Every structure is written in structure tokens, then in C-alpha cells.
Amino acid sequence: MIHSQSYKWFIETTTPFEGHMHAIARTLVETQTKFQHVEILQTAAYGKTLVLDGRIQSSQGDEFIYHEALVHPGMLAVEAAPRSALVIGGGEGATLREILRYSTVTRAVMVDIDREVVDLCKIHLSEMHRGAFEDRRTELRHEDARAYLEGTQDRFDFISVDLVEPLEEGPACMLFTKEFYTLVRDRLTPCGTMTMQAGMTKVGELAFFSSIHRTLREVFPVVAGYQSFISCFGTPWGFIVASKKVDPTRQDAQTVDRLIAERVKDPLEYWDGATHQHAFGLPKFIRKAVAQQTRVVTDANPLIVS
Ligand code: SAM
């Protein structure tokens, strides 16, 4: 019989007044890089788990939910089959892995500021990247993704913003603003899409999701929020598709299933037509928070989470 008392516990404070606990079987990595504090924990319930600055990024047990939700709604809303993609952040390489499932993709660039984090993920999280860094279509860069977007003239069919939350003193603060999303839009092809993780969608914690949604509506003609329950976070999590043309909320279940069959090489574990309908069918209190939000996040007034 397993006794919970025999474990050390990792406690993630999700809000100043709530948290989520994980029993730690083993600590594989604990170090400080130039940009952030990194832990890779072997948790008893979810297997290997990446933690940056005290926040769980993903776990072996349920990362397929997070990464399929982050990639496929955007890739399936690119009008013609996507050929090029950019991952902004992306540490573990699992976002890249999902993009590389599309055989039409000939170029996948990933820009993560922190080489040390990516190197640790390469060594310890092969279950997550599954060789994505070695794929001949992958181009891995280590620099600030905003600086990269400012400097490149390249255009992408799909851009996935897979960043850590904008913590004060963290590396991602200036990548959640109207000016940043304008840069993203301008680097997309005419029928391109962007997806991003957009924070919790639980009761009382909708300020982040709704203000990012409001900010994106300043920049993109189509903005559609959706959510998935991420077990290792212990909370439903918000995502957003911002699109120049196709509106994913107008794609019915049959269309999504057909596009997956046409575009995606291997079977998916989470995303399909039924999941799509469920995820985009946001409940009334979330729709209300989004409709009532007036805040536009700008470089002069960035959004910082504590
Ligand atoms: N799955 C995660 C989650 O829970 O949101 C996020 C994935 S990933 C680990 C986030 C990555 O964003 C980190 O590896 C971090 O180094 C990277 N990052 C943070 N700020 C960045 C910046 N300014 N430019 C590029 N990458 C950045």
C-alpha cells in the first residue's frame, strides 16, 4: 500500500488563495538558468513534469491534451493545408511535434529564448518531443521571439504562441500585448492563424483570458476562445485562435474530422470533431466575462500575473 505521507509534495499556487499538490517520486533536475528557475520532477500521478518559475508547464500523463488543443484548432483553420509554422517559446518540443504531424509542413521554426531549458528537455523529456528537434523540417533558434519577429521578413501559415505566463521579471512579459500580436499578424500569410494558451478559465479567474481575448480583437478579424481541462494544472485552461480568415467556431464536427483525416498523419488522442464542438462551446459566465472586458493590453500597460 502506498502512503501519501512518504512523498515530498510540490505545491503550485494557482491563485494567491488556492493551490494544487503533486506527490514527487523523484527530482530529476533543479537549476537556475539565465532566464528562469527549472525543475523536472517525476511525479507519482503524472510522470515527468516540467516546472518553470514554480509553474507547471506540462506533464507526461496529460500533455497530449494541452499540446493537441494548442496546435490543431489553428492548423485546421488555415484555409489551405499549412506548409510553414512558427512556435514561439515551446520548451518541451511537444508543440513542434504536433505541427510536424502535418505532412504538408515543410518548415517548422521554434524560437525559445532559453537554450538551457530546451537542452534539458531534449535530455530528460524525450517522451514529449519524440524526436521533433531532429526532424529535418525543424529550425531551432534561441533568442527573444519578439526580436525574432521584428527582424524576420518570413511569413508563416500558422504561429503557435506557447509561452510561460507573463510573470514579473519573467522573460515573456512583452509578448502578451497588442503591439506583439500586431507583429504576429503581420508575419502570417493571408489565410494564416495563430493559437495561444491564454490562462485559466475558472470562476473568478477570467481577467487574463478575457483581456487577451479583447486585445486580440483589436488586431485580428476572427478571435475564438476555447477551453480544455488540464488535469495536472487542476483547472480548466483557456486557449485562443486568432485568424485572418477561417472562423473555427463555424467548422462543424464533420468538417473537423474530415480535415484531420486529410491533413494529420497519425491518429490524435484528444482533438476531433466532438472535442472541437465541446471546447469552443464556452459556458455563459465565460462568454459574459469576454463580452464585458474592456481592457486592451499594450506595451505601455502590460499584463503581469503574480
Ligand atoms: N506549455 C507551457 C504552458 O504551460 O504554458 C509553456 C511551454 S514552454 C515550456 C514555454 C517556453 O517559453 C519556455 O521554454 C521559455 O523559455 C519560453 N519563453 C519565455 N519567454 C520567451 C521569449 N521572450 N521568447 C522566446 N521564448 C520565450
Image: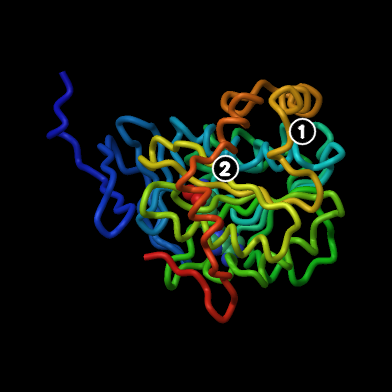
The residue under the point 53% across, 78% down is 301
Question: Between 305 and 123, which is closer to the camera in this rendering?
Answer: 305
Residue 184 lies, in percent from the top left, at 73, 62
Question: Between 66 and 243, which is closer to the camera in this rendering?
Answer: 243
Verify CB contact (< 8 Å) between mark 2 and mark 1: no
Looking at the rendered structure, the number of numbered marks drawn on it comes to 2
Residue 69 in sight: yes
The residue under the point 84% across, 49% down is 191
Q: For numbered disc 2, what is the local secondary structure?
A: strand
Q: Quadrant of the N terminus?
A: top left
Which image quadrant for residue 9? Answer: top left
Q: Quadrant of ligand 1?
A: bottom right
Q: CA distance from mark 2 to mark 1?
A: 22 Å
> What residue did someone put label 2 on?
226
Question: Between 91 and 120, which is closer to the camera in this rendering?
Answer: 91
> What residue did someone put label 1 on?
102
Query: Of label 2 and label 1, which has the lower sequence position?
Result: 1
Query: Position of 293 compared to 205: left or right?
Result: right
Q: For the residue carrying disc 1, how many other residues have a C-alpha within 10 Å: few (<14), some (14-19), or many (20+)?
A: many
Residue 52 lies, in percent from the top left, at 42, 55
Residue 303 lies, in percent from the top left, at 49, 69
Query: Position of 57 compared to 112: left or right?
Result: left
Which image quadrant for residue 229? Answer: top left
- Is the residue 133 above or below the residue 188 in the image? above
The residue under the point 27% across, 35% down is 25
Check disc 1 and give the amino acid type: Tyr
Check disc 2 and give the amino acid type: Tyr
Nearest to viewer (mark 2 / mark 1): 2
| Residue labelled 1 has its Cβ within 8 Å of some atom of ligand 1 | no
| Residue labelled 2 has its Cβ within 8 Å of some atom of ligand 1 | no
Residue 113 in sight: no
Residue 81 lies, in percent from the top left, at 84, 37
